[in-house]
Image (spheres, rainbow, N blue to C red):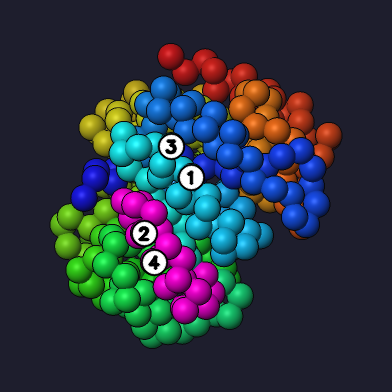
Amino acid sequence: MSELRGSFVALVSPMVAGHGPETALDDDGFARLVEFHLSSGSDGIVAVGTTGESATLTEDEHCHAIKTVVDLVGGRIPVIAGTGANSTHEAIRLTRCAERAGADACLLVTPYYNKPTQEGLYLHHKAIADAVAIPQILYNVPGRTACDMTPETVGRLSAVPNIVGIKEATGDIMRVAKIRQLAPDDFILLSGDDATACDFMLAGGDGVISVTANVSPKAMRTLCAEARKANTLIAHEIDSCLQALHRDLFLESNPIPVKWAVHELGLIDVGIRLPLTWLSEKYQTRVRDAMSNAEEVK
């Protein structure tokens, strides 16, 4: 299995200009983004996660986007495919699609909206892992899903052979130690919260799946490398230059601000799918200033 540690960009899904209910995906935009991240040194790419507007894509579009990214990357860095759903059978179908496309692993968000119990979460993820052999990473983001997967449930699932890690997006640094106690030594812990990712890695985490990396991939890769080597002062110095970006990329719901920022870099068109809309004009100067601040990272 490819190395699934370091700075993984939670890739935006480029779309043609517009913000309607069926705004089309832009394959040329995917090509520009992939080359940008390859040349910038990102350790890996997450395709069609939350930041990739997975919730608004059809199943065919979802599979097309995964295969497009996998083909463009061509094995040069790992590709993790977002394949989670609040329906177990849909998550299995998407995970099979990612396996056929050649993804290195899948990222499976806890089922949103329907609020399963901890036993339901265990059975959901075990059913997907039993159905599809591809390595799988759990994704806990209760701020989005209204459902928190406890460290104890993570520990149970870590015993399933092809469940290899978790993206933990609670921002609770204490969970690193708790999960380390309950899971095998090689279980991968990735932060899903840019604002606390530095401390997450200094506490023993393995990397981050990052929204900020869409805009500052070199800085995020360097931050991850220094934090994983326990170079605390250097890691915090880099992170301090990125904190405004970590914050302001969430002035409106993700991925609204980050798509605007990536467009500012000249990499994608002004395209987003309803019910999301383009970034409000009142926030654009703040995001632009945060991008400028991040450029101070050497």
CB within 8 Å, label 4 to label 2 = yes
Residue drawn at (65%, 32%), measured in percent from left and top? 268
SS of the residue at dot 2? Answer: helix
Q: Is residue 84 above or below residue 14?
A: below
Residue drawn at (46%, 66%), measured in percent from left and top? 94
Q: Is residue 187 left or right of residue 88?
A: left
Q: CA distance from mark 3 to mark 2?
A: 15 Å
Q: Which residue is label 1 attached to?
A: 68
Q: CA distance from mark 4 to mark 1?
A: 16 Å
| Image location of residue 73, percent across then percent down | 39, 37
- Label for residue 96? 4
Q: Which residue is label 3 attached to?
A: 72
Badge 2: few (under 14), some or many (20 or more) residues near its Cα, within 10 Å? few
SS of the residue at dot 1? Answer: helix
- Label for residue 100? 2
Q: Earlier in the sequence, mark 1 or mark 2?
A: 1
| Image location of residue 235, percent across then percent down | 36, 28
Badge 3: few (under 14), some or many (20 or more) residues near its Cα, within 10 Å? some
Check disc 1 and give the amino acid type.
Thr
Badge 4: few (under 14), some or many (20 or more) residues near its Cα, within 10 Å? some
| Image location of residue 110, percent across then percent down | 47, 69
Q: Is residue 88 left or right of residue 287?
A: left
CB within 8 Å, label 3 to label 1 = yes
Q: CA distance from mark 4 to mark 2?
A: 6 Å
Q: Is residue 165 above or below residue 153?
A: above
Check disc 2 and give the amino acid type.
Arg
Q: Is residue 73 above or below residue 127?
A: above
Front one among 28 and 297: 28
Check disc 4 and give the amino acid type.
Arg
Q: Is residue 22 above or below residue 25?
A: below
